[in-house]
């Protein structure tokens, strides 16, 4: 008889039956049995595995220091020598999701075993931990509990089986397809053998997209973070407003050599020198769009002249004397974030209240 899989499960205080928000500050507790949704997990595992321990922690407590508490949680469960770690499902719970992700990350890194959780796409834990854990897609609340646990166990079976895939150039380096097992991609690229040429495959995928048929893209979407909106401006007539663009507008001759693609630099220019009213002294470094209209009139990229009129009429406070520009053609997301942080710091230092951000 095959030895049963040893499974450890992590859940929060609510699903452990301790209580809601009034008990969110409770610390860690360990139960050597299935608890709450762990009962459904044990039922789905059947004779294949046993939930040997359930780790419980309050949402507020864990969120106080994710890294420190993940360490504490790990110390409590490593003694059970698990073959599989399951956290949640967390659905759309904003503190529970990152807690599940943090536990999956440390367990997979330290023990080298599959670590699986489940979250709704709006859960911040997806962005924070999808590259470290297998996060199954799910809805916003626990009415899907049984079906989501089934999906998690199905993915676990595939990970534990690690069956060689003859399509892979390295057949033993097998990872279940995120499309087949419905989890968020971990942005891992594997080389595969195909019968079609690249041209044939590209045309086939394009036709499927046009016909609205399901298909798997070979291109990974870059991870775009969410930016929390700032507070509304209380009095726009007193606000200082700046222009920022990734449309690649630069002084004639492009003296700072802003690249036309994969740009990693930005520049600050005097607004009235670069875009004097009535005629431009500019050109466009960006080669990712037809920029003829912008060359003829900078207002096609940024509504500078209308903003000047608003300033004269007192409908806005005043325009920032400089504008900020870069080229967003085939940009590197990580570097774009760095540039954005740098520009934002200058805007804050110059006491800018609001930004008109335009893109090509």
Image (tube, helix red, strand yellow):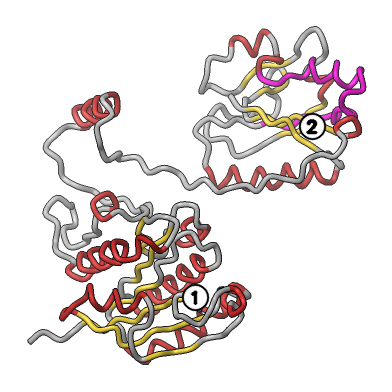
Picture layout, residue 109 above or below residue 158: below
Mark 2 to mark 1 CA distance (whole Å): 47 Å
Image quarter for residue 80?
Answer: bottom left
Query: Which class describes the residues within 10 Å of circle 1: few (<14), some (14-19), or many (20+)?
Result: some
| Numbered range of the magenta stretch | 301-325
Tell me, yes or no, whether the highlighted magenta stretch contains residue 305: yes
Question: Picture coordinates of residue 92 (x, y %)?
Answer: 48, 59
**Residue 217 x/y as whole percent:** 30, 39
The foreground one among 292 and 184 is 184
Residue 342 placed where, x, y %? 71, 46
Question: Which label's residue is closer to the chain start, 2 or 1?
Answer: 1
At 7% from the left edge and 87% from the top edge, which residue is drawn?
Answer: 1
Residue 297, compared with residue 85, is above or below; it is: above
Q: Could you classify mark 2 by the number of other residues whose Cα lies within 10 Å: few (under 14), some (14-19), or many (20 or more)?
A: many
Which residue is drawn at the image coordinates 36% and 75% (left, top)? 37
The residue where tag 2 is placed is: 242
Residue name at image x 92 percent, y 18 percent:
312
Tell me which residue sits at (21%, 60%) in the image.
Answer: 174
Question: Which of the labelled discs sits on residue 14, or is there none?
Answer: 1
Instruction: Give the quarter of the image for residue 203.
Output: top left
């Amino acid at each position: 008889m095959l030895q049963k899989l040893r499974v450890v499960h992590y859940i929060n205080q609510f699903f452990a039956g301790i209580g809601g928000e009034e008990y969110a500050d409770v610390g860690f507790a360990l139960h050597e049995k299935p608890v709450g949704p762990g009962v459904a997990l044990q039922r789905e595992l059947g004779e294949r595995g046993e939930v040997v321990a359930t780790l419980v922690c309050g949402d507020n407590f864990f969120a106080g220091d994710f890294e420190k508490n993940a360490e504490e949680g790990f110390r409590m469960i490593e003694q059970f020598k698990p073959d599989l770690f399951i956290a949640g499902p967390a659905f759309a719970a904003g503190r529970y999701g990152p807690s599940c992700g943090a536990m999956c990350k440390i367990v997979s890194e330290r023990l080298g075993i599959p670590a699986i959780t489940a979250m709704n796409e709006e859960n911040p834990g997806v962005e924070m931990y999808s590259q470290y854990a297998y996060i199954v897609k799910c809805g916003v609340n626990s009415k899907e509990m049984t079906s989501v646990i089934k999906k998690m166990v199905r993915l676990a079976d595939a990970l534990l089986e690690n069956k060689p895939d003859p399509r892979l150039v390295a057949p033993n380096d097998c990872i279940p397809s995120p499309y087949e097992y419905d989890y968020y991609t971990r942005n891992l690229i594997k080389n595969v053998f195909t019968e079609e040429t690249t041209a044939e495959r590209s045309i086939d995928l394009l036709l499927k997209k046009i016909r609205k048929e399901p298909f798997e893209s070979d291109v990974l979407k870059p991870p775009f973070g969410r930016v929390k909106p700032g507070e509304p401006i209380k009095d726009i007539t007193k606000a200082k407003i700046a222009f920022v663009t990734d449309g690649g507008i630069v002084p004639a001759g492009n003296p700072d050599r802003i690249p036309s693609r994969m740009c990693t630099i930005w520049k600050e220019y005097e607004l009235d020198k670069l875009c004097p009213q009535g005629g431009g002294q500019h050109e466009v470094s960006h080669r990712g769009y037809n920029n003829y209209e912008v060359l003829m009139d900078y207002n096609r990229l940024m509504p500078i002249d209308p903003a000047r009129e608003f300033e004269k009429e007192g409908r806005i406070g005043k325009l920032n004397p400089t504008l900020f520009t870069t080229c967003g053609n085939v940009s590197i997301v990580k570097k774009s974030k760095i540039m954005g942080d740098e520009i934002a710091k200058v805007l804050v230092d110059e006491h800018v209240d609001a930004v008109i951000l335009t893109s090509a």
